[in-house]
Image (cartoon, helix red, strand yellow):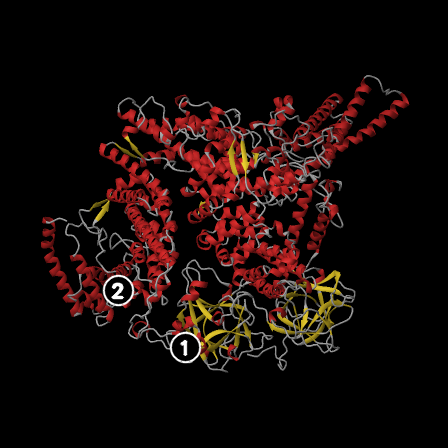
Amino acid sequence: MEDPNEDDVAEVVPLRIGDYITIRAASMGVDGFLGAEGILDQRPMVHTTPSNYDDCKWQICTPSQYSAAKELHEYEENMRALEGDDEASIASMDGDPMLLINGGGGANDDGSLMEGESNYEDPAHQAEMLHQSLIRGKQSERALNASQFSRMTGTVIKFGETVQLRHVKSGRYLTVSQTEVATVEKENLKISLDQEGSSSSLLTLGTRFRIDRDGDPVNSQSELVFKVVEGQSMFLRFSVKDVPGQEKGLSSKECNCSLDKSFWKVVLFNSYKPPEDPDIMAGDIVRLFEPEFGAYMRLLPMTSSLGTADRQRGDLFLETQSDSSTPDSNALWIVERKDASVGGGVVYRDEPFRFRHLNTGRYIGTRAAQMWKKATNLVQMIQVRPASRSGGKEAPDYVVTAKHKEHKSSSVTIHSAHQARSGRAGEGSIPVTDQSAVRLELGGRWLHRGERNAEFTTQFAEPGESLWSVYAQPHKTGPALLNLVVQRVDDEGTMLDALCGVCALPYLKRYSNLASKFRFRDVDDGVGHFRETIVTSLINYLYERPFSNSIQFAKAIPTKTGLNAVSEHRQMFLREQGVIAEVIDICELLLAPEWDLEEELKGLITRPCFTLLLNAIYCNPVNQMYVADRLKVFIGHVSSNYMATRCIMEMLATNMELQESKVNEPEVANFIDMIANSRMAANYVKLLQSVCSCQGRGVDVNQCMVADMWLEGSKHLQVKFKVGEGERKMVSWKRALPTEIANKGYKYIKGYDVHKKGVPEIFLTWETEFPELTPDALGGQGGTIPLLKIFKKGPEAETKKKHGHHHSHKALVNPVQKMRAKVAEYIVAQLLLAAEVCLDRNYIAMGMCVEAYSFELLLGILKTDDVAESLRAAVVRLMMCLYVDADPQANLRIPCLTRRWDEVTPKGEKILMPSVEKVHLFDFFLLQDYVWEHMHEMEGHASWEGSELKHGLMALLLKLVQFRYYQDPEDVINLVVPLVASLDNRSIIKVPGRPETPSDGAARIKGASSGNLKVGAIVPVDGLDMPSGGIQGPQRFPLVGPGTSRPDDFRAKKFPFLCGIMGPDLMTPLEQLDTIVALSVILFLTFAGIISDMILKPNGVIPDLAADVFSYFCSFCFTLELSSRMICYRVITGPILPKMCRPSSAQYEGPAPVFLCDPLSVLDFLVVFIDIVFIIIDILTAIGVFNNAGAEGASLTRTLRLARLTRLTRILKGARLAHKIKTSMNTTDIDDWQLPARYENTSELHMSTMLETVNVLREITKITRDYSMSQMMSSYRQWYDGKDSSNPQELFNRCYEDTKSSLSLEKNTSDFDLIFLDLCLYKHHDLVQSVLNVMMIHHNLREIMLNDFTSSQLLVKDVDQDRVLAFRKDLAVLRSDAERAELWSELNTADDRKVNERLKDSLVRLTDQIKVRSSKLRGYQQIYRSDSKVQDMLRNLGAFEVCMTVLELDSSLKEVEEDEAEAEAEAVDGPEGTRAKTPERIPTAEAIKKRQEDEKTKMVNNNILEILNLCYEFMSWFVHDNDTNQNLAFTELETFEEALADGCGAHKLIAETVRGNPTLIKAFPSKLISKCAFELSITPDPGYLSILEALVWQSSPDALGNLPVQVSILKHLTTPEFEENIMLMCAEPDSQLYAERKEWMKEAMENTANQPSDGSGSGDPAAHMPSLLQYHSMLLYVLAGTAVGRTNITTVEAKLQTIYKPDDLLSCLLDPDTTIDVLIPVSNYFFHAVIEVEIAIPGLGQQRSMWQYLKVCDEVIANSKDDFDFLSENPI
C-alpha cells in the first residue's frame, strides 16, 4: 500500500473536503506542526517537537453560513446588556423587541400575522418568542451547513477557494478574534479555537509559488498561505519569538493573524471515510477485547503526585466484565504508526504499529519477568500450579507492561487470528477492520493470558470482575494465546468526554508541584488560571456545559434533576484518569504548616478544589468510596472551608457502605474535638450528625459511638434545658379531652401536666471558655438565660426574610444579637443531633436522651408563644425520633386480610379503624392536638410553602397515622381536607430566572419583577378589590395578563349583568363571530348593501324606501357585530381605548393590549362610524335641516352623493374573511410547550414536604381499604345470620358506596383530580410516584375492595382463631425484642440471656407451625411441606416485616482482629509442614484483656448468627411454595444478597424465593448469578450452589424450563476464568479426587449412623454430609438442571457430556462404594445429560456398562417393595 504522506511518492494526492491533514510551518527556517491542546487551552501554536500529534490533526471543511448564528448572538448580547434593568426595559421598546436586532422589522416578511398572534402581546413574551425563533433559525442553519458538508465531501479543493479548518481533537474551528490582540506579537490579532466557528473562521487558500494558480487542485505536500476572508489582506502567521512559559527543551510559536504572510505546508494524514467504513485508521481510538474471558485489556490508574510508585501499576491486565460492568476509560487505546505524524490505514504484518494508552500516554511494551519476582506478592502470582489442576503452565519470560514510545519493545505487529488472512509479508496489505480478531506480537513475542491477580482484583476491579496479567511468550500456540477483537470507538461524544480529564491532568500535576513548593505566587496569574480555567472547566465538564461558563464556587451545589444534574459517566472519567486524586493531593499539600501563613491564598485554592470534589462525588457511591480513603484531608480543611464539610456530609448522608467501613472512633473523636475547640460552631455539630444516619436510616454502630462519646462523654459541650419553678402559663387547645379519659389524664396522656397546669418557663444553661458566649453575656443571670431571649420569633424571622436561611446571624449588626443567633443555631443542631442518634429506635441513645429531653419539656417548648420556628422544627423532629417512633408503637400491616369471626363487628355498632392498643390510644393526644392546630392553618392556603417545621409536622403525622392513632373515620376525613388543600399549588406564582412564557400562566404585573414578587404572592388583577382576609380556598383564581383570558368567577364578579345574559364563558360568542360562516354572512350583507345603495336604488330597480331599510338593516348588523366584539374583548382580554389601560391602580407593566390598535378592529369601527354619520344625515335631511331646493340644494345633493362613495369602505370588511381563510389554510409552527417554571424551581424542602403530605394520604388510603374490609365482613356476618336479605352483589355495592361517601379523598374537595394531576408535573420522581399510587387506589377502589375481599382469610374454627392470637403475641414479642437488641445482645445479664432465648424460641415455634411432615416425597431430600393456610395467616399479620426487623441484627456483628501471636503460632516453617517452635510469650494484662474481649465478641457474633440462621430458616419456610410470599420476599432480594457473605443462611431464603416461580426466575438479576460464580471460584460453598439449583429446578422433567437462565448459569460456571476452581466433578475413576470422594461418602455414612433413630436430629437432610460432598452433589444437581425442560438445548447437553463423560458416569453408578448421597445426583445428571437428550449418544445402547446399570436398576426396583413395607411398619 503506497503511503501518500511520504515526500518521495510519485503519485500526486489531491486534498478533498473532509480529509484529515497536518499543517506544517514552511518559512523562516521553522519546522513545526500547527496544533492546539483544544480542550482547556484554545491557543493554536506551531510546535517544533509536538509531544502529542493528536493536537496537530485538522479536518478540511466547507465554509459554513453564520448569518442566523450572528443574529442570535447579537440579540443575546443586547439582552445581557439589559439584565441590570427591570422588564420595563423591554417594554420601553414600544412593544417591538425586534429593535434588539440590527435591521429590525416585523416578524414576517409580508407583515402578516400568524394565527393566534397579536401585535399587542406582553413584550416579555414577544422577546422570548423571538429568542426561540432565532434559536430555531440557528438550528436550521446548522442543519443546512451539515447537509452542505455531507454533499461536498470528497470534492477536490482548489487554490482560491474558501474552507474552514476544524481541530479534530476538540471539534472546534480555527477562528480569528476581531476584538483581541495576540499575546506575543501584540500588533496582530489573536487566533483561537471556537466551538461553533463564525464568519471569522473562513479562510481562503492562497498560492505561494507562481507555478500554482487559482483554480488548480491543492495536493498533499502543497505550500500555501491562509488568507482571512473577513480581514483586510490579513493572513495566518506564526510568531518569530517563542511562546513564554513552555517546558524546558520545547519550542512553540504563536499563531496569529497579521498583514504579513507565513507559508504553510498541508500534508494528508487520513482521507475522509464515512463512519460506517469498517477500516481502522491510524489515530483511531479502539478497545482490545478478549472474547473467551469477556475481558478488556487495560492499564490500572497511575498513582497521583503523592502516591508511591509501583512497577506493577504500569503492567497490562485483562479485566473481565460482569453484567453490571461499565466501560472503563483505562481500556481506551489510540493506534499509531511508528511515525506518529503519519496517518494511513492499519494493516496486518506489513509494518509495526503502536498502541498508546489514552489516559496515560504510555505504550504497550514488554519487560523481563525476573525483575518482577523481587516483589513479594507477585511471586505467588507467577508460581506454577500443580499439574493435576493447571495443566502445567510454564513461567513467563516477559510481562506486558506500558512503556514510553522511545522504547524498542513498544512496536506491535498485528496478525490476524485467522491465519489465512495474514498471508506473507509483502504480498499485499490487508486492512484491519472493526471487530477484527487479531493477535499481537511484540519483538518476536506473542501476547498470552497469565494468572489472576487477587490483590489488584480486590483493589481496582468492580464486584464480579477479575484482573488477569498478560505475558509475552516466544511461542504462538497454546490455550493461553490471546485472540483479541479490535473494537473501534466511533462515538465522538465518548472521545471528547475522555479527553477533558487527560488534558487537565498535566496542569493539575504542575499546580500540585507548585503547591508543594509554595510557589503559587511565582507564576503569573497562577491562582487565577487554576480557578477560572482549570477548575471552572472541569466543573462545567461535569454538567456538560460550555467550558467558558462562569462558576460561582459557593453556589455550585449539584442537584439530582434539572439544569444542575451532573453527568455520572463524566464523574467516572475523572476518577479513572486520576483527576480526583490529583485534586486531593493539592488539598493535602495545603495542610502543611507553611500554608497557615497564607490563609487567604489557601482559601482561594481550596474553595474551587472542594467544589469540584463535591460535584465529582455527588450521588456517585463509587467515587465516594474512592475519596473516602483520604477522609483525613477533608477533615483537615473543615475548619476553614465549608465545601469540605459539604463533601463529608454528602458522603456520609448517601453512602451506607462508607458509613460502616470508614467511620470509626477516631473520626468521631476528631469531630467532637472540633466542636470543643470552636466557638459553638453549628457546622461541626452537623458534621457529627451526618455520621448517625444515611439515606434516612440510622447507622446503628455509629449511633452507639456518638451516644457514648457525645451524649455521655461530652456533656460539658451541650446546652442544657431547665424547667422553671415559677408560675405556669395556661394555653389553649383545639380539642377537648375525650370523656372516657378526662379524669384519668395522668395515666393515659403523655405531657398531661402541660395541659392541666400550663406551660412552664424554660431556661438554658451551658459552659464555655469564651466570655462573649456565656449565658450572662447574652442577657442571662447566674449562668442561665430564658429560652425566649435566644429563640424570640420576631427578629429571627425578619432576619431570615432579609438575608436568607443560612448563617443569618452574620447579617445582624448588634454583637449580642449575633452571638444569640450563633448559640441558637448551635442548640438547634444539638437537638437535631439527638434526634439522629435516636433514629430508627436506637434504644441506647434513646435512654440517654430521655433524661435530658423529657416529653413535658419538649411539649412545653412547642406550646410556648413566640418561639422561633427553627427550634420548633428541631423539637418536632426529636419528639418523633425519641417518643413517637419507639416501642410499643408498630407499623401494622394494613389492610389485615386475616380476620377472626369473633372480631367481626356486629350490625349496629360503629366500625372503627385499626388502632394501637386501647391503653396507648391517647398517649400522644396533646401532640396530635398541636398537629391539628397547624393542620387548620394549612386549610385554604395553597401557598403553604415548605419549611422545616411543616416538613417535620408532616413526617410526624405520617408516623401517627402509620401507628394507627386515628381510629375514628371522622378524625381521618378531617385530616384529608386540609392535607389536600395544602397540595393545591395551581395559583402560586413562581418567578423564574428566565423570561416567562405563556405556559407560566402568570401576567407581568406591575411591581412583580423577579426581585420583589414573593413565591405564592396574590396580587390584584384589573383593579379587582381583594377580600380583607385574603383569598381563601375555592375563591382563589390564577393571575391573568395581557393576551390571556380571565377566569369565569372573575368575570361573574366584575361583569355580573353581562354574564347573566350571555353566560360566564364569553369566549364562545367571540369565537363564533370569527367563524368563516359568520364572516361570510357579514361580507354578503356588505356587498348586498353596496349593490342596493349604489346600483339598484339610483336606477329605480328597487324602491327608495326598501333600499334605505335594507341599508339601515346592514348598518345595524355591522354595529351589533362591532359592539359584541368590543364587549367580549373588554371582558376577556383588555381595554378598548389606550386611555383605559392605565387606571389609578394600573396592574400592567408596559403597553397593554388595546382593541382599537388592531387594524381589522379599526376598520370595523370606521365602517360603523361612517354608517352612523350618514344615518344622521338622512335623519337631518328628512326633518328639513338640509334644504334640497334650488341651486344650493342641488349642489348639496351632489356633495352627499359623492360623500356616500366613502361607504365603499365596507368592502374592506372582506379583509377579515380573507385573513381567516388564509390563516386556516396555512400551517403554523407551534412552539414547543415549556413546563411552567414553578415545576422546576420549587425548593427541595417544599418538594419533600409535599411528598410527606402525599405519603400521609397514601396511608389513609390503606386505612380506607381496611375500613371497607371491616364493613364487608360486618355485612357478610349479618347476611350469614339471616339478618340481611340482600344478595352478595348488593352487599358489596352498598359497602362500596358507604366507604366512598365517608372516607373518599375528594370529599369536600371537588378539584382533587386536578390538584393531583398538577403534582404529577413536578420534576421529583418520588413525589410523582407517590401521587400516582394514591390516584390509582382512589380511582380503583371498587376493584381493590373486591380483590381484598376475595383474598381475605376469615377464620371460623376456634383452633384457627386461637392460633391467630398466639401468632400476634409471638410476633409482637419478636418485634419488640429485635428492636431492643442493642440492649441485650451483649448477654451481660441473666435478663439479657432470657430475652435471647425467648427470641429464639419464638422463631423456632413459628417455623414449626409452618412446616409439616409430608406424607410423600416431593423430590430428593424434601421430607417436609409447608402449610399454606399458616403462611397466609403470618403474611397478613405482618410476619415478613417483623422478620426484616430481626435481620437488622446483622448490623450488630463486629469484626474481630486476629491476634498476632495466634497468627505466628499458625505459621508453618518446617520442610514437612511442622509448626515452628517459637518461645512462649508471657501475655501482658492488656493482651489478656484484649483476648477476653475478642472471645466475648466471637461469642456474641456466634449468637447473633444463630438468631439470623433461625430467622432465615423461618423465612425460607414462609415463602416455600407460596407465590404471594415469594413475590413479597423478592422485593428485598438485595438485602438478602448482602447477607450471603455472613454465612447466616440467607442462601436458603433466596433459593426458596425463586424455586418453582417462573416469573421470578425470569426477573432474577443476572449480576447475582455472576456473584455466585465468582464466590464459588474462591470458596466451594454449597450455599451459593443452592441458589443456582433453585433457578434450574423444575417440578417435572417435561417442564417448559427457562433457557436463558439455564444457559447463563452453565456459562458462568464453566467460564475459563472460574472453571478450574468450581468444577469439583471427581469424574475420572483413577483420579485422586475420585478417591477423596469415597472418603467423603464414608464419613457421611458414619455421621448418618450416629444420628438419633427417632429423626430428632438436624432438620437439614444434608447435615450428615461433609461440606465438600455437599458441594459436589449440589454441583451435579445444578449442572443437570441446566438441561431440564422441553426446549431444545442440545448445546447444553453436549457441554455436560464433555464435563462428565458418559463412561465415567456409568463407572460411578456401578461402583459398589458409591452411596445414596452420590448415587442420586449422579443418576439425575446421567438422566438429563445422557438419556433425556435431543441427539442420542452413538453406541450407548451397545455398551456393556450401560446394560449392567440397567440390571442394577431392575434389582433396586424389585427390592423397593420390601423397603417401603419396612418404612410403613416403622415410621420415623
Residue 1560: x %, y % from top left: 34, 50
Q: Visible in this render: residue 1263? A: yes
Cβ–Cβ below 8 Å for labels 2 and 1? Answer: no
Measured along the vertical axis of the image, is residue 431 above or below residue 802? below
Asked if residue 809 lies left or right of residue 289, the reply is right
Residue 1269: x %, y % from top left: 35, 31
Residue 280, which numbered label?
Answer: none
Residue 1543: x %, y % from top left: 32, 55
Q: Secondary structure at mark 1?
A: loop
Q: Visible in this render: residue 1339? A: no
For badge 1, the amino acid type reads Pro
- Judging by the rendered image, the residue that carries numbered circle 1 is 396
- Of 212 and 193, the residue lying toward us: 193
- Of 569 and 710, the residue lying toward us: 710
Q: Quadrant of the N terminus?
A: bottom right
- Of 1617 and 367, the residue lying toward us: 367
For badge 2, the amino acid type reads Ile
Residue at horizontal 19%, vertical 58%?
1647
- Judging by the rendered image, the residue that carries numbered circle 2 is 1735
Which is nearer the N-term, disc 2 or disc 1? 1
Measured along the vertical axis of the image, is residue 816 above or below residue 599? above
Asked if residue 243 lies left or right of residue 621, the reply is right
Q: CA distance from mark 2 to mark 1?
A: 43 Å
Q: Secondary structure at mark 2?
A: loop
Residue at horizontal 73%, vertical 37%?
1150
Residue 1195: x %, y % from top left: 88, 26
Residue 1020: name its quadrant. Answer: top right
User: Crowding near pointer 2: few (<14 within 10 Å), some, many (20+)?
Assistant: few
